[in-house]
Image (cartoon, helix red, strand yellow):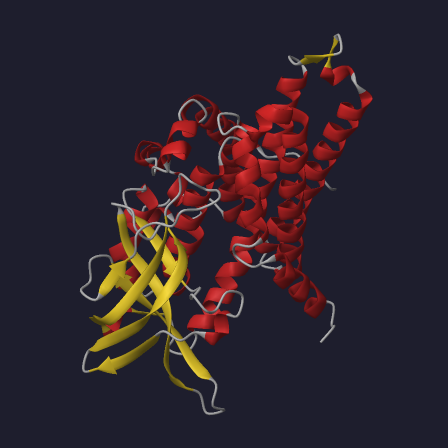
Amino acid sequence: MIDFRLGEEYEALRKTVHDFAQAEVAPVIAGYYEREEFPYDLVAGMGRMGLFGLPLPEEYGGMGGDYFALCLALEELARVDSSVAITLEAGVSLGAMPIYRFGTEEQKRTWLPALCSGEALGAFGLTEPGGGSDAGATRTTAKLDGDDWVINGSKAFITNSGTDITRLVTVTAVTGSKPDGRKEISAIIVPSGTPGFTVAPKYSKVGWNASDTHELAFDDCRVPARNLLGERGRGYAQFLSILDEGRIAIAALSVGLAQGCVDECLRYVGEREAFGHKIGAYQAIQFKIADMEARAHTARLAYYQAAAKLLRGEPFKKEAAIAKLVSSNAAMDNAREATQIFGGYGFMNEFAVGRFYRDAKILEIGEGTSEVQRMLIARELGLR
């Protein structure tokens, strides 16, 4: 029997996060966005709710839930604001999950409790200034010197990397050469404040203005050899698997933004009048909103299916790529249409749809561009 209804626990979580987003995030987030200020109090609130530990085991301070629970939380947060949602998404899928998936028992017990509580944030440094989608072209190096790794290089566009509560960044670095001459890429945990590890001033961004994003530099940065995360030479492959999961999470966030556009438009067209009528009475507006709802609905089904396959332990790479592609397109299309419906007000940052429009584009770029998703889908179909 096919049943798309959420179970009681999932629905209770969804409603709890929905209420938090409406009561705590919505009234204040515009100010954070305009000031380009990181919302520490909102992050602390999410931490107290256990959101940062949703898919992680209780023995490490988590909530003992699953990845779909995280996705539901991300969708509800992004219906109100994407900066808050991406802080949670990156903190869990890029900060904590690599340590949980590949870390030693010592690494898990050292780092995960604080990450699960939201008292600390972790980040993952993969992208480099000259790399972009070609993450395999890593230039950052790490060489063993006695009992230390010595790291040199730089990373770009790293979320959660420079906050006051950032405790670590896991970075990919070239640690040697494979027998066939290809680069051996490994992942290494670098605690914040390590000498030789410099966080550049925050970027001036088009969107996600209340989230934290920096370029990172490593200049003879020394960390203990035991900070190697997972198997030496498997860092790139490890992170590709983390990205597969992360694409489902970004799809959920994208669906939230797409649905938030519908929410805002429904409120607006019931109040705004033009030519003697509420604008929601005009079929041209009705059709726009109907298309927006259809996009959000279809994209939600895509990420639900990808998450279901992930939870069942089945291959889900193609479904994750489809979900990411469809959902990010839906977010961008809905943000554009919502801005059009709002007219001049949609161009003002004080209105949520203005922020949604600025936030939507990065969803077609981050954690794998739309072009990369199409490439992955084609490969899974056997097109080489």
Q: How many marks?
A: 0
Frontmost residue, 58 versus 331: 331
What residue sits 77% from the left and 15% below the top? 281
71 relative to 227 in the view: left or right: right
What residue sits 28% from the left and 81% below the top? 143
Q: Position of residue 193 (x, y in %)?
A: 20, 58
Which quadrant holds the N terminus?
A: top right
Q: Quadrant of residue 271?
A: top right
Q: Quadrant of residue 63?
A: top left
134 relative to 138 in the view: left or right: right
What residue sits 48% from the left and 25% below the top? 350
What residue sits 57% from the left and 51% below the top? 248
User: Going by the picture, which residue comes out furthest to the right?
Assistant: 283
Frontmost residue, 77 versus 229: 77
88 relative to 217 in the view: left or right: right
Vertical placement of residue 276 versus 209, above or below: above
Vertical placement of residue 97 versus 176, above or below: above
Which quadrant holds the C terminus?
A: bottom right
Vertical placement of residue 373 versus 326, above or below: below
User: Going by the picture, which residue comes out furthest to the top?
Assistant: 276
Frontmost residue, 175 versus 230: 175
Frontmost residue, 268 versus 3: 268
Q: Position of residue 23 (x, y in %)?
A: 44, 21
Q: Position of residue 141 (x, y in %)?
A: 34, 77
Does residue 181 appear in the picture of this structure? yes
Does residue 64 appear in the picture of this structure? no
